[in-house]
Image (tube, rainbow, N blue to C red):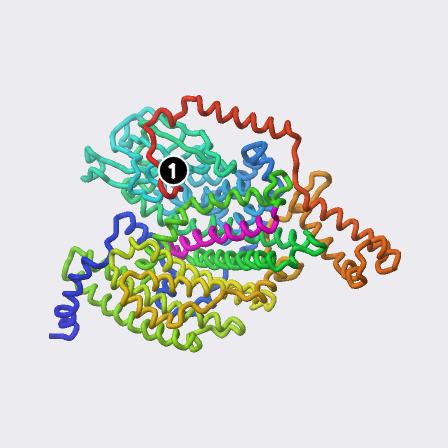
C-alpha cells in the first residue's frame, strides 16, 4: 500500500471524522462573505513569515496626469464653492450650484468606465478626490463617495447584464439618475439574514403590458442619497411560490434596480445624522411591481445578493471611509499644530507644554499611519486585488484612529472647538466621527467578528481548504483533499512553532528583515510577532474549534494584532516609498513603537484569558516568556513628532499634502485661512520675539526704545498679534438669532410628529440592530 494511502486511510480518516465536529461551521451569509473578494498582504501575514522584499517591491499608487488635473481643477473649484456652516445650519443641503457642478463634472461617475461616459479613475484617484473633499466638507464628501462605493454603479459593473450596463451606466455617469442603495432595515442591521423585506415572483402590469416580475414590500432606513434618488438599488429576500423562475420556493437575498417614481414607493423623508445634512433617509415600498429583468444580473443572479454585496464592498470599503479618515487625521495635524503654535498661555506657546505635546505627537503619527495604509490599500486595489479582510481592517481601523485624532484635536483647541459658528472648523468633523464608525459595517462587529473571524478562514494557507474538504458531499474526494490540506497545515504549524519560539527567546534579533537602515529592527519585530500570531491562531483553532467564533473578545484581540501587523507594514512601506526621509523617522518610530506595544498587550490578554489553560501556558512559554516588554514611543519621539506639525518643514508638508487650503478674502474670512495666516506670521516674527526674550523685555514699546527691535519689527509683531487674536476668536450670536433658529427647528419637529408619515402606517419596528448601513 503506498505511503500516502496508508496515511490517508489509517491516520487522516479518524482525524477527518473528528474535524467534522470540531471545526466551525459556516452560515450561508458567512460563506458568501468569505468567498467574496480575495487575499493579499493579509495572507502573507498569516503565513507567519512575511516576505518583506515582496512588499517593498510592490509599486506604490500613482495618479495619472488626467487624474492630477482633475484634483487641481474641478476638485479644487468645488472646494471653493463649499461652506460647511452654510450647508449644515442655513441651507440644510448642498447649494443648487454645487449639485449642478457635481453632476456636470461627473463626480458621481469616478468608477464608471469612460466607455459609458464616466471618468474611469483608479482607486487611488477616487480616494484622493474623497480625501480632498473631506478636508473641506463632510456633506460634500459623503454625497460624492456613495455613488462610487456600495451602490448600483459598482454592482452593475461587476454583475449587471450588458443591456443593464448600456442603459443605466451612461445615465448614472451624466447625473440623469441619482442612485442610492437600500440594505439596512429596522429588523436587519449587521444580521442580513434577519431581513424581512420581500419580493414575490408573479405576473403583473408594467408600463402597460403584462410581464413576469416581482412584487416588492420593504422598509429601509439610513439610506444615503435616498431622499433624492431616482433609482434605488434594493436588497430583499425573493420568494417564488409558483416556481415561475425555478424549482425553489425561497430563493434568498436578491438585488434589483427600482425606479423611485413607481406606484407604492414612499421616499423623500430625511434623517439628520449627527446634525449633518447630507441626503439620508428612510423609504418604504408597498406592493411595488418591477419586471424580473430589473434584477441586477438578470434571473441568473437571483439569490446571490449577499455575495454580490460583499464582493462590491470588498473594494469600496477600502476607499471611501479610509479616505475620509485619512483626510480628517491630516486635517487635525494641520490645524492643531498651527493652533498650538499660535496659542499662548503663561506667555508661552502651548505647543511647548509636554501635556500638549503628547496629544500633538499622537495626532501627527496617526495621520502618518492612516494615510500610509490608505495608499498601500489603494495600490493593491489598482493592481486588481479585492482583499475583503484588508478593506474591513481599513474601514474599522481608519475610523477608530480618526476618532483618536479628532478627540486629541478637540482637547488641544479647548473652548475654540466647542463653540459652534462659522469660525469653528472642528465641530463638524467631531460630529461626523460616529457616522463613519457606524456605517459600512459597525466597528464593534467588524473588530469582533470580521477582521479575524473571516480573516482566519480566508487568509490562512490551509484552513479554508480543510473546511471545504469537510463539507464536500463526495466523501472520498473530500478525504483526499483534507489529507493534503491537513498535513500541509501540520507542517505549517510546526514550522511556525519553531519560528515563534526561536524569535521570542532571542528578542527577534535574528528574524528576517528588509535592509532598511534605521527601520530594519522594526521589520525584525514584525517578523517575530507574525510567527507568534500564526502559531497562536493554529493552537486556538485546534483547541477551541467552532467555539472560537463565539469567543468574541479573544477574536477581537486577534483582529487587533492582525490589524497592527498590516498598518505597521504600511507605515514601513510608506517610509521606504518616500525615500526614507530622515525627517519622517520620528513619525515612523512612533507608529511602530505604539503598534508593537499594542501587539504585545493583546498577546498577553489572549494568554491570560484563554479558556484552555495548558495551551495558554504553552503560548506563554513559546511566544511571550517575559510578558509584554514594549512601552510605546518614548517622550523624545513624542516631542519630535509634535515639533513636526508645529513648525513649517518638509515633513509637515508631506503629512498634510493635498488638503484644501482656503484663502482669507475680505471680511468673509474662513477660520482655517485665518489660522494658517496666523501660523505663518507667528513663525515669521519668532526671531524678533526671541531677541526680546533674550533681553528680558516683554513690552514692545520698551524694546523699540532700547533698540532691541526696530519700529518695523514692532509693526510686524502687532500685525501678527492682531491676526492671532482673530484666529483664536470664537463666534457669538444675538439672542434673537438663536431663538429664531430654535423656534424654526421646533416647528419642523412638531409638524413631523403630527403628520401621518409612513412610519405610522406600517407595523412598529423592532429595536435597532447593533449596526446599521
Query: Magenta span has 183?
Result: no
Mark 1 — residue? 182
User: What is the residue that sits farthest to the left in this orientation?
Assistant: 1
Mark yes or no: residue 710 visible.
yes
Q: Which residues are magenta?
A: 385-414
* Element carrying mark 1: strand
Give me the residue at 50% from left, 37% from top: 278
Along the line of sight, the residue nearer the viewer: 441 or 40: 441
Q: Is residue 770 above or below residue 742?
A: below
- What is the quadrant of the C terminus in the image? top left
Along the line of sight, the residue nearer the viewer: 207 or 723: 723
Task: Report whether 386 appears left or right of 279.
Answer: left
Mark yes or no: residue 69 visible.
no
Give me the residue at 69% from left, 39% from top: 668
For label 1, count other residues whose C-alpha is less than 10 Å away and answer few (under 14), some (14-19) or many (20+).
many
| Residue 494 point in image, percent of width and height | 29, 73
| Residue 636 point in image, percent of width and height | 59, 67
Along the line of sight, the residue nearer the viewer: 181 or 26: 26
Task: Report whether 569 appears left or right of 354.
Answer: left
User: What is the residue that sits farthest to the front in this orientation?
Assistant: 346
Amino acid at each position: 500500500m503506498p505511503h500516502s494511502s496508508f496515511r490517508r486511510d489509517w491516520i487522516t480518516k479518524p482525524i477527518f471524522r473528528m474535524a467534522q465536529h470540531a471545526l466551525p461551521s459556516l452560515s450561508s451569509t458567512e460563506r458568501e462573505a468569505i468567498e467574496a473578494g480575495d487575499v493579499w498582504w493579509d495572507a502573507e501575514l498569516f503565513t507567519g513569515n512575511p516576505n518583506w522584499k515582496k512588499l517593498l517591491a510592490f509599486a506604490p499608487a500613482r495618479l495619472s496626469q488626467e487624474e492630477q488635473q482633475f484634483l487641481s481643477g474641478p476638485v479644487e473649484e468645488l472646494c471653493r464653492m463649499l461652506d460647511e456652516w452654510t450647508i449644515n445650519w442655513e441651507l440644510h443641503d448642498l447649494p443648487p450650484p454645487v449639485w449642478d457642478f457635481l453632476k456636470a463634472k461627473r463626480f458621481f461617475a469616478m468608477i464608471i468606465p469612460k466607455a459609458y461616459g464616466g471618468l474611469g479613475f483608479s482607486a487611488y484617484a477616487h480616494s484622493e478626490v474623497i480625501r480632498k473633499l473631506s478636508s473641506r466638507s463632510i456633506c460634500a464628501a459623503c454625497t460624492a463617495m456613495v455613488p462610487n462605493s456600495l451602490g448600483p454603479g459598482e454592482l452593475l459593473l461587476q454583475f449587471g447584464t450588458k443591456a443593464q450596463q448600456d442603459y443605466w451606466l451612461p445615465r448614472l455617469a451624466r447625473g440623469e439618475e441619482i442612485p442610492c442603495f437600500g440594505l439596512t432595515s429596522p429588523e436587519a442591521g449587521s444580521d442580513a439574514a434577519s431581513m424581512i423585506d420581500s419580493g414575490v415572483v408573479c405576473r403583473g402590469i408594467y408600463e402597460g403590458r403584462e410581464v413576469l416580475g416581482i412584487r416588492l414590500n420593504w422598509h429601509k432606513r439610513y439610506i444615503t442619497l435616498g431622499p433624492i434618488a431616482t433609482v434605488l438599488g434594493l436588497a430583499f429576500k425573493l420568494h417564488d411560490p409558483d416556481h415561475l423562475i425555478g424549482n425553489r420556493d425561497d430563493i434568498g437575498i436578491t438585488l434589483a434596480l427600482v425606479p423611485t417614481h413607481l406606484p407604492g414607493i414612499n421616499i423623500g423623508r430625511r434623517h439628520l445624522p449627527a446634525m449633518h445634512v447630507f441626503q439620508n433617509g428612510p423609504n418604504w415600498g408597498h406592493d411595488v411591481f418591477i419586471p424580473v429583468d430589473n434584477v441586477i444580473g438578470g434571473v441568473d443572479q437571483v439569490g446571490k445578493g449577499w455575495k454580490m454585496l460583499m464582493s462590491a464592498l470588498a473594494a469600496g470599503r477600502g476607499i471611501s471611509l479610509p479616505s475620509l479618515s485619512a483626510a480628517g487625521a491630516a486635517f487635525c495635524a494641520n490645524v492643531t499644530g498651527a493652533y498650538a503654535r499660535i496659542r499662548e498661555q503663561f506667555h508661552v506657546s502651548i505647543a511647548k507644554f509636554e501635556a500638549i505635546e503628547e496629544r500633538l505627537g499622537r495626532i501627527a503619527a496617526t495621520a502618518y499611519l492612516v494615510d500610509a495604509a490608505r495608499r498601500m490599500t489603494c495600490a493593491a486595489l489598482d493592481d486588481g486585488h479585492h482583499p475583503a479582510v484588508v478593506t474591513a481592517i481599513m474601514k474599522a481601523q481608519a475610523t477608530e484612529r480618526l476618532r483618536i485624532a479628532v478627540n486629541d484635536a478637540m482637547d488641544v483647541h479647548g473652548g475654540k472647538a466647542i463653540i459652534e459658528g462659522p469660525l469653528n472648523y472642528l465641530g463638524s468633523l467631531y460630529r461626523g466621527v460616529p457616522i463613519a464608525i457606524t456605517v459600512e459595517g459597525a466597528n464593534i462587529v467588524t473588530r469582533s467578528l470580521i477582521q479575524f473571524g473571516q480573516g482566519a478562514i480566508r487568509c490562512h494557507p490551509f484552513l479554508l481548504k480543510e473546511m471545504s474538504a469537510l463539507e464536500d458531499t463526495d466523501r472520498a474526494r473530500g478525504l483526499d483533499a483534507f489529507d493534503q490540506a491537513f498535513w500541509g497545515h501540520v507542517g505549517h504549524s510546526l514550522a511556525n512553532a519553531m519560528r515563534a519560539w526561536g524569535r521570542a527567546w532571542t528578542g527577534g534579533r535574528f528574524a528576517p528583515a528588509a535592509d532598511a537602515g534605521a527601520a530594519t529592527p522594526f521589520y525584525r519585530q514584525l517578523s517575530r510577532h507574525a510567527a507568534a500570531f500564526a502559531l497562536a491562531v493554529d493552537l486556538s483553532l485546534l483547541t477551541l474549534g467552532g467555539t472560537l467564533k463565539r469567543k468574541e473578545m479573544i477574536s477581537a484581540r486577534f483582529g487587533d494584532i492582525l490589524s497592527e501587523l498590516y498598518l505597521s507594514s504600511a507605515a514601513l512601506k510608506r517610509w521606504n516609498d518616500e525615500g526614507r526621509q530622515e525627517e519622517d523617522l520620528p513619525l515612523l518610530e512612533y507608529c511602530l513603537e505604539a503598534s508593537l506595544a499594542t501587539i504585545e498587550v493583546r498577546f498577553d490578554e489572549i494568554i491570560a484569558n484563554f479558556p484552555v489553560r495548558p495551551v495558554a501556558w504553552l503560548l506563554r512559554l513559546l511566544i511571550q516568556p517575559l510578558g509584554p516588554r514594549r512601552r510605546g514611543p518614548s517622550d523624545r519621539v513624542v516631542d519630535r513628532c509634535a515639533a513636526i506639525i508645529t513648525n513649517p518643514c518638509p515633513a509637515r508638508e508631506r503629512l498634510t499634502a493635498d488638503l484644501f487650503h482656503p484663502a482669507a478674502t475680505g471680511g468673509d474670512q474662513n477660520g482655517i485661512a485665518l489660522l494658517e495666516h496666523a501660523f505663518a506670521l507667528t513663525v515669521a516674527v519668532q526671531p524678533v520675539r526671541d531677541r526680546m526674550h533674550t533681553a528680558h523685555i516683554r513690552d514692545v514699546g520698551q524694546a523699540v526704545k532700547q533698540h532691541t527691535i526696530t519700529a518695523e519689527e514692532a509693526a510686524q509683531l502687532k500685525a501678527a498679534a492682531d491676526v492671532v487674536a482673530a484666529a483664536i476668536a470664537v463666534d457669538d450670536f444675538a439672542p434673537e438669532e438663536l431663538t429664531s433658529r430654535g423656534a424654526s427647528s421646533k416647528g419642523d419637529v412638531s409638524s413631523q410628529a403630527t403628520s401621518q408619515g409612513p412610519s405610522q402606517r406600517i407595523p412598529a419596528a423592532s429595536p435597532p440592530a447593533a449596526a446599521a448601513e
